[in-house]
Amino acid sequence: MKRFCASLAVSLAMLALPAAAQVTGVDPSQTPVAPAEKAKSPAQLRAAELDRLFGQLHAQNAEASAATIESKIWANWSRSDSATAELLLGQAGKAMAADEYDAAQSILDQIVKSYPDFAEGWNRRATLYFKMRRYQQSLSDIERVLELEPRHFGALTGRGMILMQMGKPDEALAAYREALSMNPYLQGVADTVKQIEKERPDI
């Protein structure tokens, strides 16, 4: 940040200090200085960024930039205080993309054990369990994701998908609606909600 110096004003202020000290009886050199604000931790910075991004997502006329904002939110969720956790998450993603589910689960098990507060580790394992049709385990991991990040519209969407697979459209609809309350620009989810409402007007 640039600093602007007014030499004349500084000189006058310095000359005035002794007089002020005589009048008040206070030695300006002994006046306590307010401590500088402590630097925020990486986790605090990510949380502040996430709040800002969700604010932008819910601002008026956000539709044009919604996709970009959503991508930034996902990138935020994928970051961790630990570079190792991020590396492992990337490896798990590659294993899942190659349908190497055993390898992916081994990596994700390691992440959630070593970094239990890293919500995206739980979310990726929930996704893996869904792919493996292990729905109850997926729902369990989704619960953990939402404890750590209640606005995780990806996890909420996943919950809706699982509940539909389990033949629970009313509960699925509730999950989808909650996902849309977090991110109103999930077009696929919005379309699914309309379809369920059309087929089941009673719920």
Image (tube, rainbow, N blue to C red):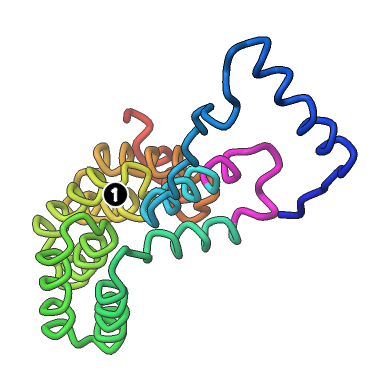
Above or below for 90 versus 56: below
16 on left or right of 51: right
Query: Toward the viewer: 178 or 145?
Result: 145
Q: How crowded is mark 1: few (under 14 residues within 10 Å), some or many (20 or more)?
A: many
Q: What element carries label 1?
A: helix
What amino acid is labelled 1 in the image?
Answer: Gly
> Is residue 87 part of the magenta span, yes or no?
no
Q: In which quarter of the image is the C terminus?
A: top left
The magenta region covers 54-66
Location of residue 59 by image quarter = top right
Most extreme residue toward the top, as rendered? Answer: 23
1 on left or right of 56: right
Residue 39 percent location from the top left of the image: 45, 49
Residue 48 percent location from the top left of the image: 47, 46
Q: What residue is at 32 percent from the left and 64 percent from the top?
A: 80
Q: Quadrant of the N terminus?
A: bottom right
Residue 40 percent location from the top left of the image: 42, 49
Q: How many marks?
A: 1
166 on left or right of 93: left
Query: Toward the viewer: 115 or 22?
Result: 22
The overriding secondary structure of the stretch rendered in magenta is: helix
Above or below for 134 versus 155: below
Q: What residue is at 14 percent from the left and 85 percent from the top?
A: 103
Q: What residue is at 56 percent from the left and 40 percent from the top?
A: 55
Residue 181 percent location from the top left of the image: 45, 37
Above or below for 29 versus 159: above
116 on left or right of 190: left
Q: Name the residue under label 1.
A: 160
Q: What residue is at 12 percent from the left and 66 percent from the top?
A: 114
Query: Toward the viewer: 62 or 16?
Result: 16
